Amino acid sequence: MLREINVTPVKSLGQNFLHDRNLSRWIVEQIEPEPGDYVVEIGPGLGALTGPLLEAGADVLALEKDRRLADHLRTEFVNERLEVRHIDALDFDVLTLFAKPRVKLIGNLPYYISSQLLIKFLEYPSPMSLAVLMLQMEMATRLAAGPGSKDYGALSVLLQRHYKIRFVRKVPTAVFIPRPEVDSAIVKITPRAPNDLPEYDDESFTALVRQGFSQRRKQLGNVLRDYIGDWPTAAAAVGLDQKARAENLSLQQWIDLTNFVRPELRSASVQQGEEMFPVVDESDRVLYAAPRSKVHGDNLRHRSVHILIFNESGQIYLQKRSRRKERHPGLWDSSAAGHVSAGEDYEVAARRELMEELGIEAPLQKIGQLPASDRTGQEFVWIYRGQYNGQMSLNREEIETGGYFQPVIVTGWIAARPGDFAPGFAECWKTYLQRSR
């Protein structure tokens, strides 16, 4: 085939073509393709995996950096379920995939950029529901390694906090043309369930892990001296030998250590238990004030605000609600949102929520009001719009994570995966789009 299309493998692109058809089909089987799947294939080459994927009924997006091979794929596989893009996968906008209900990732990653591709496509939050990847043996071993192994490092821990990674099988050099200099291996990567691990502060976790593995031969107590002053107490609390090194800690122990350094925050429900909300009638007129628990428990009409913050590039900031939230835990929501307290008006509440949740101030513009309904949790909602370009200080009691997204991506994401969003935000976004036309 290479001779027929006059293509010589380019070493600088890491081109090693899989020629074992049985292995190709076996690899595709691992991703469990079926009609309705949207499979992103990185580096399809001559189409060894592309063909079986299409036969299984999946829609395939093939990202190919070599124009010669991209043109070949379009000719070889004339199929309306195949889209071939001549693009460097590192330049692909992964967030656009949120507009697809079920996305899977497959590919024989070029060894020289495999770590960059992994970080790009699996960076949390990622739209991928499953990934089956062929990697250099050394990289595959590192990803799946457990504590106590020489291959276990910062990359292992930082990826395993969000994914379960399984080493599936070794792949010999003989199945490739030309033969690579090292063996390959296949790993299967699946996202962890939301409550699979205890809650912890992600920034603190990342900092500890990176610092801990920065000098892996040294005892952890010495390496983390700037983070943990009383190492004997910390080690005892986490169940560690005081002489432990970074490679000795399991993922759970890294989380425990993070929560020792930055103790878990008190439950938001404890803090909010005595909040008083204004109860209103069908015209949003205040009737009386009642505790939060009664307002929510009796499903009484009350008030809230949603604030949509955009940056100078026109991207909107969305927050992912903490698992501790009373309503809609773990779902994506407006930049900031919250209830109007007794004695407050809407605008005062909006400015307060911005400061409490994001730690910022910004001029706000009214967009419109939503009536109280089941979709809004019986809340009258005023929607505000603002612009902010600086750093935010997230309230970790309220927010798990957040990020900026192009509006078109948000619209497609809501349509494809409505269950990812708090219902109130979906209503606010619909209103915002209508008012901004």
Image (cartoon, rainbow, N blue to C red):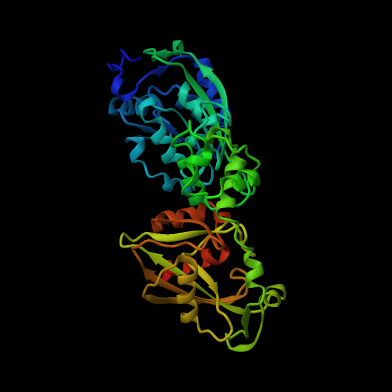
Residue 16 placement: quadrant: top left
- Between residue 182 and residue 55, name the one nearer to us: 182
Residue most toward the top? Answer: 174
Q: Is residue 263 left or right of residue 133?
A: right
Picture coordinates of residue 127 (x, y %)?
50, 45
The residue drawn where x is 56% and y is 62% is 397
Say which quadrant the N terminus sits in: top left
- Between residue 436 and residue 214, name the one nearer to us: 214
From this viewpoint, is residue 256 visible?
A: no
Residue 6 placement: quadrant: top left
Picture coordinates of residue 147 (x, y %)?
58, 31
In this view, 124 is above or below 317: above
Q: Is residue 66 left or right of residue 33?
A: left
Say which quadrant the C terminus sits in: bottom left
Picture coordinates of residue 316 (x, y %)?
40, 61
- Between residue 42 and residue 3, name the one nearer to us: 42
From this viewpoint, is residue 279 visible?
A: yes
Count of numbered labels shown in the rendering:
0
Picture coordinates of residue 283 (x, y %)?
58, 86
In this view, 328 is above or below 58: below
The residue drawn where x is 45% and y is 65% is 358
